[in-house]
Image (cartoon, coloured by chain):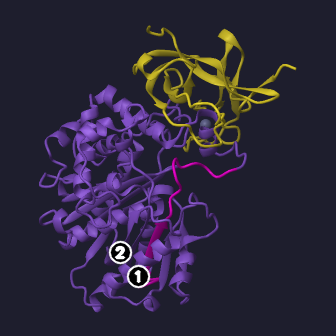
Amino acid sequence: MTADVAVLGVGMHPWGKWGHGFVRYGVTAARAALADAGVEWRDVGSIVGADTVRGGYPGHVAGATFAKALGWQGARVTSVYAACASGAQAIGAARAQILAGLADVVLVVGADAAPKGFFRPAGGERPDDPDWLRFRLLGATNPTYFGLYARRRMAVHGDTLEDFAQVKVKNAAMGALNPYARYRKRVTAEEVAASAPVADPLRLLDICATSDGGAAVVLSSLEFARRHGAARPVRVRAVSTVTPRFPNTVLDLPDIATDSAAAVAPAEVTFRASIARAAYEEAGIGPGDLSLAEVYDLTTALELQWYEDLGLCGEGEAAKLLREGATAPGGRIPVNTSGGLASFGEAVPAQALAQVCELTWQLRGRAGGRQVPGARVGITANQGLFGHGSSVVAVV
Amino acid sequence: MPRIRLPAVANWFTGTGEDFRLLGTRCSDCASVFFPREDVHCRNPGCAGGALVEVPLSPHGRVWSYTDGRYRPPSPYVSDPELPWRPYTLIAVELPAERIVVLGQAVPGVTVTDLTVGMDVRAVPGVLYEDAETTWTTWHWRPVEVRT
Ligand SMILES: [Zn+2]
């Protein structure tokens, strides 16, 4: 087990399509998190930026860009890129600095101004880049991979389109209660079924949108938190940032093929399951200890996959868990009380941080109408393109 | 002047008709197979790293899953924006001998309603797109028996 760090403050800029630059969202979130922590920016010893290069500003490095916008004050800077997992890696970097004694207080910021339509690779002719190749050779957009996973679940586990729709119904109902969500309207199963097909068997309302948004977290040592008067802060107990193990046998974006398992037997658990397993081991807990989970519902079907990968149920039993209401408010293990990506849309480098913001509000008992009564332990789970695992366990 | 035929990606497939094969590489030390081909280092972490030798992959496999693209993909996918978008079908195919899943477009005309998970398919030559001078070729998956 690793030592804990304290979550002193969290903050977000509402998700949406606001038409501003990403710096504005990040700075708004950062100021909110600093205010929530009761910490002055000039007293922050380190800033970690969660990067993206997809919004059209490669080189406009997030960590230093936010430090400049907040006002240069000399803080140590770190910038990390891990696609959708950037936020968790930023938390991992911040935690390592705190536990190594390099900084008492670290500000972690992620923000994005999302492009319109499909995510696409940067321009040019780059046949050595798998992300470029899958678009050039196959036209394989992100939703087509999601369609493959959904169809596979239907064939292997008997999931139905109605099950997928019920995930959206559940998450939209929670998003309606979240002031930071982009979509704050309940959705019916009929509306999901009537939405436009995008990548068989998935429809528009099964798939998360791309959004603008920003999220920030202020982390500190437990000693600093105590001196600061935070007697019982929410604590980060584990940060899993694992990579896959060869052979990786689940077809994964942006790859055109899996690894071959002809010569080497695959690991006992898939990459996604190993992300959670590493977090559980580091935290010294198991799925039975969880009060809630925030998972990366890029699609309704993927949320069901995460139930199994987090060990909330056995393989193939996710739809049953959903139908029983176990993952809904009031259930045994509510999932995506924030409303999830279904209600937010994806603001890539901010998303894993937004998951931690929700855990923090829940563990403080300040999640309003979304509150899970008596929440003590929460987990986030997420997976970034190119083999970036991400899971954070927070406790109170 | 007729267009010349060139592969849309070099050295990933070879042959015509019944002799068409996807090309991967195999490590001469640990026998791991790679597609897309690895030509520099074996990626098996337990392998000291042998020479990587080009090998044809099995032409037949089973459908692992399938989907389609109802909207025009962005560049670098090449399509004529003047023409209405015609959805294409994508099939992920498990090759039993290599124990690998390879994604590809289905031959034109095959839709998701023609497919089931586990169905037998075969790799066949296909056309990705054409420009003024060149027909850019690729691989397609074709169901061995198309239901009608
Ligand atoms: Zn080898």
Residue B8 in the figure: left or right of residue A360: right
Residue stretch in magenta: A101-123
* Residue A59, visible in the rendered structure: yes
| Tag 2: amino acid | Gly
**Residue annotated with mark 1:** A31
Rendered colour, chain B: yellow
Name the spot of residue A114 as percent of width and height, x first.
Answer: 50, 59
Depth order, front residue of A212/A239: A212
Which quarter of the rendered picture does the C terminus of chain A lie within?
bottom left
Determine the CA span between mark 1 and mark 2: 7 Å
Q: Is residue A335 visible?
A: no
Q: Quadrant of ligand 1?
A: top right
Looking at the rendered structure, whether the residues under marks 1 and 2 are on a common chain is answered as yes
Q: Is residue A245 above or below residue B99?
A: below
Q: Quadrant of residue A192?
A: top left
Label 2 residue near ligand 1, CB within 8 Å: no
Mark number displayed over residue A11: 2
Q: Which chain is purple?
A: A
Q: Quadrant of residue A156?
A: top left
Please give the name of the residue rendered at 26% of the width and 52% of the height, measured from the top-left corner.
Answer: A172
Q: Residues within 10 Å of mark 2 (few under 14, many from 20)?
A: many
Q: Is residue B78 above or below residue A98?
A: above
Instruction: Determine whether A352 is above or below A203 in the image.
Output: below
Label 1's element?
Answer: helix
Label 1–label 2 contact, CB within 8 A: yes
Q: Chain of mark 2?
A: A
- Identify the amino acid type marked 1: Arg
Q: Earlier in the sequence, mark 1 or mark 2?
A: 2
Mark 2 element type: strand
Q: Chain of mark 1?
A: A
